[in-house]
Image (cartoon, coloured by chain):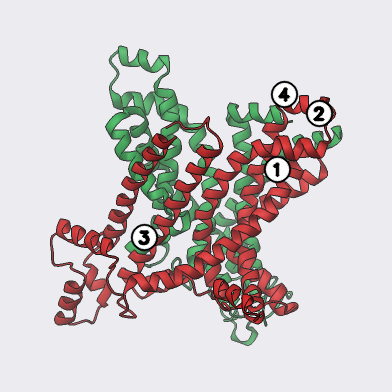
Amino acid sequence: MSQYILKRLFFSLITLIGITFFVFLTIHLIPGDPVEIIAGGEADEPTKAQIRKSLGLDEPLAVQYIAYMAGLIRGDLGRSLWTRKPVISEVWNRAAATLELGIFGLIISIAIAIPAGVISATRPSSLVDYCSMAVSFLGVSMPAFWVGILLMMAFSIEFPLFPAMGRGEPLLSAIWQVFQGNFEPFGDSLRHLILPAVTLGLFNAAFIARMTRSSMLEVLNQDYIRTARSKGLAEFKVVYKHAFRNALLPIITVVGMQFGYLLGGAVLTESVFAWPGLGRFIVESILARDYPFIQGALLFFGTAFLLVNLLTDILYSYINPRVRVE
Amino acid sequence: MRSFKEIASFSRHRLALAGFILTCVLILTAILAPYIAPRSYTDMNLGRIRQGISADYPLGTDEFGRCILSRIIWGCRVSLKVGLVVVLIGGIIGSIMGLVAGYFGKMVDQLISRVIDILLTFPYILLAIAFVSILGKGGLEQCMIAIGLANVPRFARLIRSYAISIREMEYIQAVRALGGSHWRIIFHHIMPNCISGILIYATLTMGMSILAEAALSFLGLGIQPPEPSWGTMISTGKNYIRVAPHMSLFPGLAITITVMGFNFLGDGLRDYLDPRFQKSNKSQA
């Protein structure tokens, strides 16, 4: 067990170093002179020299990478060219908003997808199965940002139940205030969260539902389920106590992987709902050619995905001792 | 109960057929765009901006009074072009990487697999955005290259797994014993056996790439106006959702139908071409 985890950690560490190298390279892979592109066409020589120096681009590549890694270990990712603030704090402030949205979106997608998948699997090829799979087919084909706009049309404009834009009080601090007897910020942040989180969740629900269905179907076809049925267990018990627990394993992996994609989907959802998260700012920083910020944001997304996958794998091997291969 | 099963299995084929017909219609629309679009996609009519459905403008007009139907028809050409080029870029580079990694194994495989792993730690759309940040946002070409590169690791991983399973087969050892070179084995004996897998995945990737292009264009990082892109149309339409919801409604519908067509076709191809999937499908039924 511990050997498996150690091995997994070791490979993750290598991948992590690879991520830092890829992120570091982004600025060097720009065709032409990156300084020219960052500064824009009209900049004079001294300005360019200053940008070159501030980004350390006048050093050899290896020296630059070592300096970048040394900075990274100290928690220093340079300063944003746009706001002039340290990248690490800028990224962290926004990442909190993205994580809040991502976690809430994940909860919504699980709440929709797992019941839908289980019900479809217990009645394969029935009308219910048919409808829920049709919806999930639709879910993977619709652009998430368009779904967001449709929801906004319906629930912010036609029936103004939820605000169309922005974020309320950060959820954690809103929850803290609930303990102090102040309920208003909590309601406010929930109302702001609902539409973007549903947008994000629906798309992922489609994937998780399909996985849940096929995993449940596989388990329900096994002999021990027939045994459970033939000894007269209630169907409900067979499905939830015997089948679902075993079907859960592949579902956990998919949910773990989906969280990474959820963070990717957040880029679009944040732009639709003007959610002040990392995804929206990465787009703005690309338009503003703020490379230190882009690098910081990419590093965050890559590392977050890696960590979630690592945790999923460890959890998986913990639950299912049969799987310790590779 | 039985009748539902029959309907379901029948409709699986029907869905594949629907996907096939849908993609044919889309391809024809893209090719014949200049003939079937009622107007040019740049024709403005400032007297009739942001109007709803009418006899003159079947899907209404946008903020410059341009015909939305014509822009959607021309946009179909752009979307399919992006999908095709992306699949070619991702498919060719990815397949070569996968074949080489899977066939040679050992250090070569370790090296390529690590690169694939690293790229796969970035969510698909974010990887495309990362490549846009490298290439600079410029328009159609950058957009296609960025999404194409974002597809490379996925293709590579899939083809690698095929190559590994084929590598061990006896006929490959026979070719090797006959003195066939590595490249001959890879391109003449392993690749042809991966083609059906590549084809299925390429079809599904078409849908994903069209979605990705729409997403990049929606964010302002993809195709730039006045070139008609469904994503850009939704993005401008969003500014007018209170007064002219049709501006973002119809392009979104076009994307959904297109992506669904390719997904149906891809799933149908998989049922048809992939024997492993057929087997598991039967055991489920």
Q: Is label 4 on the same chain as label 2?
A: yes
> Mark 3 is on which residue type?
Leu
Please tell me the numbered disc located at residue A223: 4
Q: Are marks 4 and 1 in contact (CB under 8 Å)?
A: no
Q: Residue at x 67, y 75 (%)?
A: B245
> Mark 2 is on which residue type?
Arg
Residue labelled with disc 3 = A299
Residue labelled with disc 2 = A229
**Circle 4 — which element?**
helix
> Mark 1 is on which residue type?
Leu
Camera-near label (3 vs 1) is: 3
Q: Residue at x 46, y 27 (%)?
A: B193
Q: Is residue A253 left or right of residue B120?
A: right
Closer to the chain start, of discs 3 and 2, is 2
Residue labelled with disc 1 = B15
Query: Which lettered chain is shown in red?
Result: A
Camera-near label (4 vs 1) is: 4
Colour applied to chain B:
green
Q: Is residue A156 visible?
A: yes
Q: CA distance from mark 3 to mark 1?
A: 41 Å
Residue A84 image position (x, y, % from top left) = 30, 80
Closer to the chain start, of discs 4 and 3, is 4
